[in-house]
């Protein structure tokens, strides 16, 4: 167990160091068995956090992200969090004013993360394979840059399906209703 944990920690450290040493705009910590975002990384990335545009934390075991994560990486363009155990985002996600893409597929959201509707630059929201029934359609419809929202494989209520069609000018991807032929 400890050996595996040590390997995971070493892998995270190696990837963080690559980002810092090469002044990369991407921090890729996918598949690092992270249960939370390591606090030590903030210190290491202190001088380059403003350069980081893409963070990939896919396929970890994250249960939450902190407000500090959102405010530290405030210049993000893309945030990939698919395949974790997240069920909510901190309120400070609304500080990610440059964010264009957020992938929250294969998580444990039961409520649509409404703070995302405050992000003016956001173009793509992926919430495929969560447990969301209700969606703030009016707020999504008012988002200026939004191009695509993926809600496939969510137990959406019928009302969402009905009101979404006339209101929404972007691609709204939903699973076909049970028993309905295309």
Image (cartoon, grey):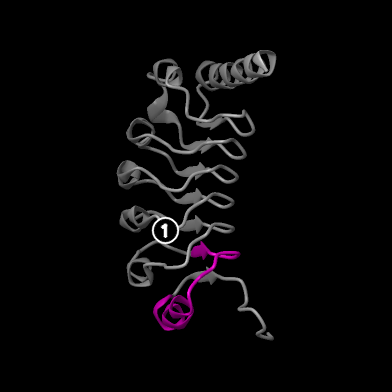
Label 1: which secondary element: loop
Magenta residues span: 148-168
Q: Residue furthest front?
A: 1
Tell me the residue that label 1 is attached to.
Answer: 111
12 lies above or below 119: above
118 lies above or below 175: above
Residue 49, given in percent of the width and then of the height, sits at: 40, 26
Residue situated in front as seen by the camera: 158 or 25: 158
Residue 143, given in percent of the width and then of the height, sits at: 35, 64
Residue at the image position 39 percent from the left and 55 percent from the top: 113
Residue 104, given in percent of the width and then of the height, sits at: 52, 50
Question: Left of 43 or right of it: where is 28?
Answer: right
Pointer 1: residues within 10 angstroms few (<14), some, or many (20+)? Answer: some
129 lies above or below 82: below
Residue 168, given in percent of the width and then of the height, sits at: 43, 75
Screen quadrant of the C terminus: bottom right
């Amino acid at each position: 167990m400890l050996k595996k944990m040590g390997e995971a920690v070493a892998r995270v450290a190696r990837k963080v160091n690559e980002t810092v040493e090469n002044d990369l705009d991407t921090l890729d910590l996918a598949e690092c068995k992270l249960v939370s975002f390591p606090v030590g990384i903030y210190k290491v990335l202190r001088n380059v956090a403003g350069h980081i545009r893409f963070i990939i934390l896919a396929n970890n075991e994250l249960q939450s992200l902190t407000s500090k994560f959102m405010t530290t990486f405030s210049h993000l363009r893309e945030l990939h969090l698919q395949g974790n155990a997240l069920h909510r985002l901190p309120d400070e996600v609304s500080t990610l004013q440059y964010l264009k893409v957020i992938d929250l597929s294969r998580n444990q959201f039961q409520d649509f993360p409404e703070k995302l509707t405050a992000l003016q630059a956001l173009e793509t929201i992926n919430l495929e394979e969560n447990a969301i029934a209700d969606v703030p359609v009016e707020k999504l419809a008012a988002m200026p840059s939004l191009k695509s929202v993926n809600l496939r494989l969510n137990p959406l209520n019928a009302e969402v399906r009905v009101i979404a069609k006339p209101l929404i000018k972007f691609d709204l991807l939903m699973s076909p209703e049970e028993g309905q032929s295309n």
